[in-house]
């Protein structure tokens, strides 16, 4: 990611269990996401600078193909940032500068908006005992904290849907990992 948000220096990579990797898409100035559909067949990825969320078909071996625009965010609604997917296949998208999280259907239609009392909404994910709590992160970067005292806070919203636990990344047993101690 380019901190200035203009030069395209970021890429979408795929990392294998043996720690080999391949470049899948890009370049991007500011890339966010990604998140995978409940059936594992779709990957969503955000090009924040361009205001676009892309969808990719994801093969059973993890290869990505058929990149297409899923949604484009009007700049008056902020810029797309982090996202997650619920068990119904709907996408929950944070809006940097947009004071909200938007839920989109798998067809890209707006299904609901969660207003947030902070402008820089950065990401969201499901958690909690039954995975029905949406945790929403925000930033305080370039924000007047007198006007927006909750900027930089973590918000929790109870939903009527659930998210899916993310599988932890597992390194192949054939890979040696060097452990570095901190003095």
Image: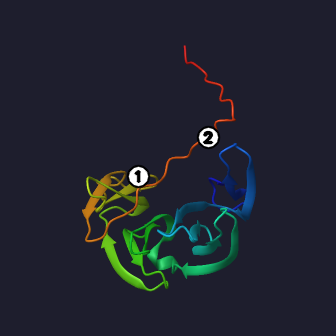
Q: Residue at x 65, y 69 (%)?
A: 59
**Residue 93 rendering spot, x and y as whole percentages:** 45, 69
Q: Position of residue 96 (x, y in %)?
A: 47, 65
Residue mark closest to the camera, 2 vs 1 = 2
Percent across and percent down for residue 108 are: 49, 83
* Residue at position x 61%, y 80% in the image: 69
Quarter holding the C terminus is: top right
For marks 2 and 1, the one nearer the N-term is 1
Instruction: Name the residue beneath numbered marker 2.
Output: 171
Crowding around mark 1 (Cα neighbors within 10 Å: few <14, some 14 to 19, many 20+) is: some
Splitting the image into 4 quarters, where does residue 64 fall? Answer: bottom right
Q: From this view, report whether residue 140 is shown above or below residue 51.
A: above
Question: Which residue is located at x 54 percent, y 80 percent?
Answer: 71
- What residue does disc 1 label? 140
Badge 2: few (under 14), some or many (20 or more) residues near its Cα, within 10 Å? some
Q: Which mark is residue 18?
A: none
Q: 70 or 155: which is nearer to us?
A: 70
The front one of 7 and 87 is 87
Q: Is residue 97 in view from this perspective?
A: no
Instruction: Give me the residue at 55% from left, 46% from top.
Output: 169
Q: Position of residue 18 (x, y in %)?
A: 70, 43
Q: Is residue 57 left or right of residue 100?
A: right
Name above or below for residue 95 compared with residue 9. below
Do the residues under discs 2 and 1 have CB atoms within 8 angstroms? no
């Amino acid at each position: 990611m380019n901190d200035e948000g203009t030069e395209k220096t970021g890429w979408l990579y795929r990392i294998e269990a043996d720690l080999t990797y391949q470049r899948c898409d890009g370049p991007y100035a500011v890339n966010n996401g990604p998140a995978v559909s409940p059936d594992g067949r779709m990957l969503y990825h955000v090009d924040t600078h361009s205001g676009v969320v892309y969808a990719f078909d994801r093969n059973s071996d993890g290869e990505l193909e058929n990149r297409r625009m899923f949604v484009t965010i009007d700049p008056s609604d902020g810029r797309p940032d982090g996202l997650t997917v619920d068990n119904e296949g709907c996408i929950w998208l944070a809006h940097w500068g947009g004071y909200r999280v938007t839920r989109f259907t798998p067809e890209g239609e707006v299904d609901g908006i969660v207003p947030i009392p902070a402008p820089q909404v950065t990401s969201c994910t499901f958690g909690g005992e039954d995975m029905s709590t949406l945790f929403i992160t925000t930033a305080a970067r370039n924000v007047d904290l007198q006007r927006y005292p909750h900027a930089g806070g973590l918000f929790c919203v109870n939903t009527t849907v659930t998210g899916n636990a993310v599988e932890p990344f597992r390194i192949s047993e054939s890979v040696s990992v060097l452990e570095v101690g901190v003095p």
